[in-house]
Structures are given as structure tokens and as C-alpha cells.
Image (cartoon, helix red, strand yellow):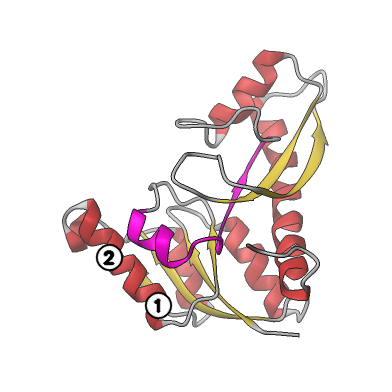
Amino acid sequence: MKTLNIAFLASHGGSNMQAIIDSVRESRLNANLVAVISNNSNSTALHRAEKENIPHYHISSQTHGGSDEMDAAIAETLKSCDTDLIILAGYMKKIGTRTLNAFKGRILNIHPALLPKFGGKGMYGKQVHQAVLESGETVSGVTIHLIDEKYDNGPILAQETVPVLKDDTVNTLAERVLKKEHSLYSKTIAQIISGEIPLP
């Protein structure tokens, strides 16, 4: 079984990233953690990476000017780490063309709803859960997909459902969905490593 080199892009807390790190540390995932990149110099994700001794990089408009320069820096950093798979863990910037092309079919994102419902530009975090509740849906869930040039549009690799309860608030629904995110991300990566989920 191949050992994949995994890199993360995260903007804030990186709790999904930490769940994957824990899976690797506990030998539930056969992977090398080669980089954490954040556009936020003070993100918890970077602090987590430092604590876990994972190479980490702040790449943003502060360090590299415009979006093209950022994209080039991200792509080169990922290549230099021999990255096989990129995991987006709450990364709030759109991935640039250079990075997309260099790692086509190798960039995973997680979405806190059952795509194609409740996806698209601006649909992230609590906005998604608010929209689910306002719609009257009785089921929400988690989607893991490959990314492309459009928001929340790439091929779906895995989905799991989460019930929407009658007394749910945005926060209670978000908490249950996040718990499912933590388990499904690691499970899906394990299935990619084993070949059960083939990438393009």
C-alpha cells in the first residue's frame, strides 16, 4: 500500500486537519504529513502544525502580493514537498489556476451539506447550516469532493447524512455535522490510499 504525502491548506482553526493528523499519528492512516499552508499568519492551523512538527508556511497577500504570486508560491511549495494529495481544511481562498493544474484531481474539499444542495460562492460555515434550517430539510450531511474552477462543483467522492432535528439551531446542527466531518475525511483518505476510491 502506497504511503501518500499529504499537505493541508487552512485559514483558521483546522479542526478537520487535526482529526486527520490524529488518524496518522494513531496509525489509522498510512500517510506522511508534509506541509501546512495558511493565508492567516496567526491561524490555529499553523500553531497546530508547529506543535506537530509539520513544515508550515504563511502564504498570503501580505507575503506575496497579488493572487497570481500567491498561487505560484503555493504551487511551488507543494511541489517542493512532493505532495500527492492536498486537503482543504477550512481554506477560505479560491485555489488558483496554477495550483489547480499542477494537482488536478488531487485536491480534496469538505462541505458541511449534501452537495449539490447548499453549495456555491458564499456558502460556507454557518451560512450553510442557516440555509438548511430555513429550507425545512430534515436531513443534512457532509460531502467530500475534488475541486475544480467553480465553487463546490467537482466530482463527489463521499457523502454521509446527518439528521436535522426539530429543535436544531445553527450551532447544534453545525456541531453534529462537524463531528461527522472529522470521521468522514479520514475515512475517505484511507479509501483513496487503499484504492477503494480511485482518483482520476
Where's the N terminus, which quadrant? Answer: bottom right
Residue 114 drawn above or below residue 107: above
Q: CA distance from mark 1 to mark 2?
A: 11 Å
Q: Amino acid at mark 1?
A: Lys
Q: Position of residue 158 (x, y in %)?
A: 74, 50
Q: Residue at x 61, y 65 (%)?
A: 18
Q: Position of residue 143 (x, y in %)?
A: 69, 44
Please identify the residue farthest to the left as the structure is shown. 65
Q: Which residue in the structure is indicated by mark 1? A: 79
* Residue 3 lies in the magenta stretch: no
Where residue 134 appears, as percent x and y from the top left, is 65, 14
Q: Is residue 67 left or right of residue 43?
A: left
Residue 40 visible in the displayed image: no
Residue shown at 74%/14% (left/top)? 136
As displayed, is residue 38 above or below residue 151?
A: below
Residue 72 bears which disc, if any? 2
The image quadrant of residue 101 is: bottom left
Q: Residue 177 location, x and y as percent?
A: 72, 41
The answer to whether 60 is drawn above or below residue 93 in the figure is below
* Range of magenta residues: 96-113
- The image quarter containing residue 30 is bottom right
Q: Which residue is at 58% across, 63% downward?
A: 17
Q: Amino acid at mark 2?
A: Ala
Dot 1 or dot 2, earlier in sequence: 2
Residue that appears at 81% across and 22% down? 138
Q: Report crowding for label 2: few under 14, some 14 to 19, many 20 or more residues within 10 A (C-alpha).
A: some
Q: Determine which quarter of the picture holds residue 74.
A: bottom left
Q: Secondary structure at mark 2?
A: helix
Q: Quadrant of the C terminus?
A: bottom right
Nearer-the-camera pick, 25 or 198: 198
